[in-house]
Amino acid sequence: MPVNRNNRRNKKKKEEEAKPKLKEKVTEILELPKEIVLNVPRLTLIGNGNLLIENYKGIIEYDDKRVRVNTGSGIIKIVGDRLVIKEITSEDIMIDGEIQAMEFIK
Amino acid sequence: MLLLRLWNYIRGYVIILVEGYFLEKFINICIHRQIFLWDIKKLKNSTMRLKVSISGFKMLRPVARKTRCRVRIVKKKGIPFTWNRYKRRKAFVIGAFAFVVIVYTLTSFIWAIEITGNKKIETEFLLQHLESMGIKPGILKYGISTDDITSKLMLDIKELAWTGVTVKGTKIKIEVAERKQPPELVEKNKPCDIVAAKDGVVKSMVVKTGQEAVKAGDTVTKGQVLISGAVPTKNEQINTRLVHAIGSVKARTWYEARHAVNTKVLDKERTGQQKDYYSLIFLTKRFGFKTDSTPYEECDRVEIVKKLSFGKDLELPLGIVIDRFYENRVTEREISLEEAKQAAMDEAYKEATRDIPEDAEIVNTDLNYVEDESGAVIANAVIECIEEIGVTKEIGGK
């Protein structure tokens, strides 16, 4: 029984792992916008001074030297100088300033 | 982006300072409640400055209480606030409103009439004609029918070949094209003579219908019958038969002009002294300086009209006129006889050629100098032409 249960759990795990892959494949085939279907952010960085994060979840920390934004693919940490939130709505956030580093924290 | 900023300015927004420890939470809640924030800037650890619309600001109070933040207005910007500030100043609002109304009413009148394209017809004549039709500076521009003006002008003034009327801003622009006057023709079935239009010596004639009254080589005077429409018949009861004379008569004609040779030339020179007189134009009237007396003995007068206008065509009936007088110094100068002769001859030649019709052929030009009784030299230009001088004239008519 325990073996059996283990087996079943393993199966389930495999299915869970397979599911996002399938979703990804479907979106790729149908050419759907990934950030909406997969609930991941879309980042647009212009030079090192203009960052637009679409499809974000919320901001965790805001300072003029460091910004942390929660998104579907983890927390994005932005380190820079004179950071300003130029615009913020429920879907996207635009950060202006001199961006020095970006990091994804799981 | 610019559009968004303009929109925000129109709607009005406030710049606020938010002080507290949970600023991120504050922002998140605001976003969650659909309060639009922009230009968020962290000042110190516990304060940030941001912009929010008026309607958003009203919804901010519960959020601030929840996150224990203090909100302070730094600046109010936008049209609603500006409007509020000026609403109390009644005179200002009235003035602004009156300005718009006055400009609008003033620009709904015609203040200038511009006539272009006329060469022989005088502008003054056309203006007078227009005035008799009721078109003059100071009338409302909305009642004007350009088609009416065009057709009336065309009907009344025979010399016009084409007229274009446009109302542009506070101006009426009238463009005209003049017609070359056709010679008065006698109808084909009416008997007529061919008479001389001017003096000359007949060179050749071609008679198609009628009886020739002169021969080649005859000297004719203006009005003399050249080809008669009265043809003698052999019938004894009726001596003559009246026909419509047709034919061409070419004659030598002379054009002469004289100009005295003068070795003394008056030179005008501006001394650099000038005087300005200002007067004001309002509507169609002129106020202020209005005199015909001149400040200098010898001077040129230049009238400079400066009118208040928006652009080129929207002219307001308000302006100033500067009468500028330039003082002249007149000096007498002696030039050589040759030079003077040449100048006089040029003048005489120009004068003589002025009357020559376009279709005349110039065959000989004679330039000479004569002395009159007092001994003065006169330049004499004689130009000999061959031209058609026959014109029809109704028998028994005028």
Image (tube, coloured by chain):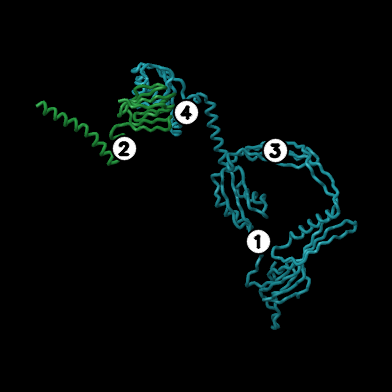
Chain colours: A green, B cyan
Q: Distance between the residues labelled 4 and 3?
A: 42 Å
Q: Which of A101 and B299 is in front in this view?
A: A101
Q: Which of B366 and B335 is in front in this view?
A: B335
Residue B80 seen in render = yes
Residue at position x 86%, y 60% in the image: B370
Of all residues, the one furthest to the left in this rendering is A1
Q: x%, y% of residue A70?
A: 32, 26
Q: Which of marks 1 and 4 is in front?
A: 4
Q: x%, y% of residue A10?
A: 16, 30
Q: Distance between the residues labelled 2 and 1?
A: 80 Å
Q: x%, y% of residue A87?
A: 40, 28
Helix, strand or loop for disc 4? helix
Q: Give the chain letter at badge 2.
A: A
**Please, what is the three-letter code of the amino acid marked with disc 2?**
Pro
Both labels 2 and 3 in a single chain: no
How packed is label 3: few (under 14 Cα within 10 Å), some, or many (20 or more)?
some
Q: Name the residue under label 4.
A: B79
Q: Name the residue under label 2.
A: A33
| Rendered position, B275 above or below B67 | below
**Please, what is the three-letter code of the amino acid marked with disc 4?**
Ile
Disc 2 and disc 3 in contact, CB within 8 angstroms = no
**Please, what is the three-letter code of the amino acid marked with disc 1?**
Gln
Residue at position x 84%, y 55% in the image: B338
Q: Name the residue under label 3.
A: B322
Q: Mark 1 points at which residue?
A: B181
Residue B33 seen in render = no
Left or right of residue B27: residue B308 = right
**Please, what is the three-letter code of the amino acid marked with disc 3?**
Ile
Q: x%, y% of residue B344?
A: 81, 55
